[in-house]
Structures are given as structure tokens and as C-alpha cells.
Image: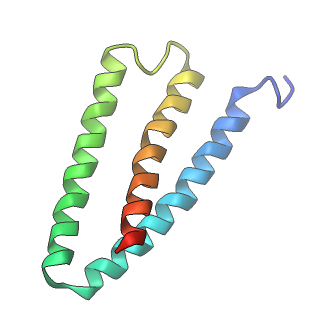
């Protein structure tokens, strides 16, 4: 199967890109947490609640068929779900 017809090539690239983006958010959050204070406490609480919310939303999508019917579609939509969350955090943390 050629790379153009194999959806897993793109999914692998998307997973790699998500890892790079998540590393950036981890670095931004680490700096914020290291600064301490009420802002750091709020970020720590937000971080945990966002992870729980993102997981619950993904489960809801899975149970309602929102992730597709093939393994490749499910993987791609799962990555897209988390990339949206990571990008939003990156934008928000860059402002502060």
C-alpha cells in the first residue's frame, strides 16, 4: 500500500506533531508553576480539570459514534480532539 493510500502515515505524523505541541505546553506550564503564587495554583487546578474534561468528552464521542467506524478514523479524530485542546492551552499560556 502506498503512503498516500495508507492513513496511518498521516496519523503517525499527527501523533508526532501532537507530541511536539504538548511538549511546548508542558514547558509553558512548568514556567508558570515554577513562578508560584495564586496564578500557579489556579493553573494546576485548571490543568487537572481540563484533562478530566477532555477524557470525558472523548468517551462521549466514542459512545455516540463521533469518532468514526474504522480504527484509522478513530485514531485520527482522537488526535484531532486532543490537538484542539493543546493548541488552545498554548495560545492561552502564551498570553500570560
Q: Quadrant of residue 94?
A: bottom left
Q: Residue at x 22, y 45 (%)?
A: 52
Give how far across and how far down residue 55 sits, in percent: 29, 39
Q: Residue at x 50, y 39 (%)?
A: 79
Q: Is residue 26 above or below residue 58?
A: below
Q: Quadrant of the C terminus?
A: bottom left
- Left or right: where does residue 39 sit relative to residue 8? left
Q: Quadrant of residue 14?
A: top right
Q: Residue at x 35, y 72 (%)?
A: 29
Depth check, front residue: 84 or 52: 84
Give how far across and how far down residue 51 sits, in percent: 27, 49
Q: Is residue 12 above or below residue 77?
A: below
Q: Is residue 4 above or below residue 38?
A: above
Give how far across and how far down residue 85 sits, in percent: 39, 48
- Left or right: where does residue 39 sit relative to residue 64? left
Give how far across and how far down residue 41 sits, in percent: 15, 73
Q: Residue at x 36, y 81 (%)?
A: 31
Q: Is residue 3 above or below residue 29?
A: above
Q: Quadrant of residue 7?
A: top right
Q: Residue furthest right?
A: 2
Q: Quadrant of the N terminus?
A: top right
Q: Residue furthest bottom?
A: 35
Depth check, front residue: 80 or 94: 94
Depth check, front residue: 69 or 28: 28
Amino acid at each position: 500500500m502506498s503512503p498516500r493510500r495508507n492513513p496511518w502515515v498521516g496519523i503517525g505524523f499527527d501523533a508526532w506533531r501532537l507530541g511536539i505541541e504538548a511538549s511546548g505546553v508542558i514547558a509553558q506550564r512548568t514556567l508558570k508553576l515554577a513562578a508560584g503564587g495564586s496564578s500557579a495554583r489556579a493553573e494546576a487546578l485548571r490543568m487537572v480539570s481540563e484533562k478530566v474534561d477532555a477524557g470525558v468528552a472523548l468517551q462521549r464521542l466514542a459512545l455516540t459514534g463521533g469518532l468514526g467506524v474504522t480504527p484509522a478514523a478513530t485514531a485520527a479524530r482522537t488526535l484531532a480532539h486532543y490537538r484542539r485542546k493543546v493548541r488552545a492551552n498554548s495560545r492561552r499560556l502564551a498570553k500570560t
